[in-house]
């Protein structure tokens, strides 16, 4: 049972990473409203292709005429998300079946994942029906990253590498720092999602300055107003320049803080422990961290090329997996599932 759960969790983790990257690709290629309805596309399981289907779709949604390339991007993302949902339900089933055979078997995380994937589907629907409302788009991203992290946690708990290390005083001392690193990283990922949802990535076209200044005019109150009512089409963004600059600069400041903290944490893993598992995690953490920062800078100086922007989202998700793996590795062995 443990091996079967590990395999399902690993496959689901890989698929969740694909879904996160596909979601970024859809968002960054302006295809988030490629299908103006949900869960189908212009009322169909696929994208309308025949001339009469396209004509009927355009009549039904005159404000969103069919753009097949954008619609297919959105539908492929939905197909992969649907497959991920089935795997999450399978994990929940395996956990409860094991619980029936082995009283006390932990089912909390798999059960929460089932509830979360249902809520993610609702967020996906609201992303479309509320016309890319930024708070919904950001919540959908964070929900996807939470799903990815918890699936990875389940895989690690059931025997995937890296395994937990022994609860030495040094490992115990690292736990709060690793947890703080996770909190800081999640906050930075949320900021990145807010930048993307508000189309603020290109409002600082230079680096390290922004619009030729170290501290340009910014409106933080307007930039971080979460709720702006209903019925607004947010495609392309609706905020003025000063608000978007405030969002972008906040993300840069968060990136610097995250880089310094996780860089310090990675170096501490390399220098302060003889444990090979933690050294390996430290090396991977630093490599992924430097890659992520480089991609972020490249997004600015190259004016947000699509592949670089998508890679920035994907590597951010991988960085999250590294920090989750670190937190898991610092757990004592006796707390693992037998």
Image: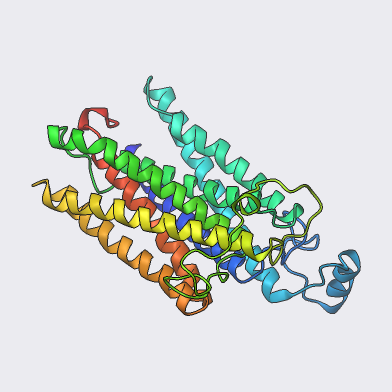
From the top left corner, tell me how far across and down residue 294 is, in percent: 36, 70
In the image, is 144 to the left or to the right of 259? right
In the image, is 312 to the left or to the right of 199? left
Q: Is residue 301 visible?
A: yes
Q: Is residue 159 visible?
A: no
Residue found at x 11% / y 46%: 273
Residue positioned most to the top = 103
Q: Nearer the viewer, residue 230 or 108?
A: 230
Dividing the picture into quadrants, the one containing residue 263 is bottom left
Residue found at x 26% / y 59%: 286
In the image, is 266 to the left or to the right of 137? left
Which part of the image, by quadrant, shows the C terminus? top left
Residue found at x 79% / y 72%: 66
From the top left corner, tell me how far across and down residue 287 is, in percent: 27, 63
Residue positioned most to the left = 274
From the top left corner, tell me how far across and down residue 309 is, in percent: 49, 70
Which part of the image, by quadrant, shows the N terminus? top left
Q: Is residue 172 above or below residue 190?
A: above
In the image, is 153 to the left or to the right of 202? left
Dividing the picture into quadrants, the one containing residue 47 is bottom right
From the top left corner, tell me how far across and down residue 196 is, in percent: 57, 61
Q: Nearer the viewer, residue 109 or 328?
A: 328
Dividing the picture into quadrants, the one containing residue 102 is top left
Q: Nearer the viewer, residue 194 or 307?
A: 194
Q: Is residue 303 above or below residue 144?
A: below
């Amino acid at each position: 049972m443990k091996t079967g759960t590990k395999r399902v969790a690993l496959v689901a983790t890989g698929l969740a990473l694909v879904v996160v990257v596909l979601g970024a690709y859809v968002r960054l290629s302006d295809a988030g409203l490629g299908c103006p309805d949900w869960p189908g596309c212009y009322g169909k399981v696929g994208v309308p292709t025949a001339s009469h289907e396209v004509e009927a779709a355009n009549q039904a949604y005159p404000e969103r005429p069919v753009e097949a390339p954008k619609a297919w991007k959105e539908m492929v993302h939905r197909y992969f998300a649907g497959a991920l949902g089935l795997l999450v339900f399978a994990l929940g089933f395996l956990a409860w079946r094991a619980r029936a055979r082995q009283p006390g078997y932990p089912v909390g995380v798999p059960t929460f994942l089932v509830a979360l994937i249902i809520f993610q589907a609702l967020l996906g629907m609201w992303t479309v029906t509320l016309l890319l409302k930024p708070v919904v788009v950001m919540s959908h991203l964070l929900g996807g990253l939470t799903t990815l992290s918890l699936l990875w946690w389940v895989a690690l708990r059931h025997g995937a590498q890296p395994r937990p290390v022994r609860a030495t005083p040094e490992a115990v001392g690292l736990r709060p720092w690793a947890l703080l690193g996770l909190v800081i990283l999640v906050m930075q990922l949320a900021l990145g999602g807010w930048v993307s949802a508000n189309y603020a990535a290109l409002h600082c076209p230079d680096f390290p300055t922004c619009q030729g200044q170290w501290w340009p005019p910014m409106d933080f109150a307007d930039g971080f107003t979460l709720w702006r009512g209903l019925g607004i089409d947010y495609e392309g963004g609706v905020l003025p320049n000063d608000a978007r600059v405030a969002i972008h600069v906040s993300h840069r400041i968060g990136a610097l803080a995250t880089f310094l903290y996780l860089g310090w944490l990675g170096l501490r893993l390399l220098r302060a422990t003889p444990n090979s598992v933690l050294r390996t995690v430290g090396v991977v953490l630093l490599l992924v961290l430097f890659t992520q920062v480089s991609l972020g800078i490249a997004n600015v100086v190259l004016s947000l090329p699509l592949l670089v922007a998508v890679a920035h989202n994907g590597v951010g998700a991988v960085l999250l997996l590294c920090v989750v793996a670190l937190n898991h590795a610092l757990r004592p062995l006796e707390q693992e599932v037998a």
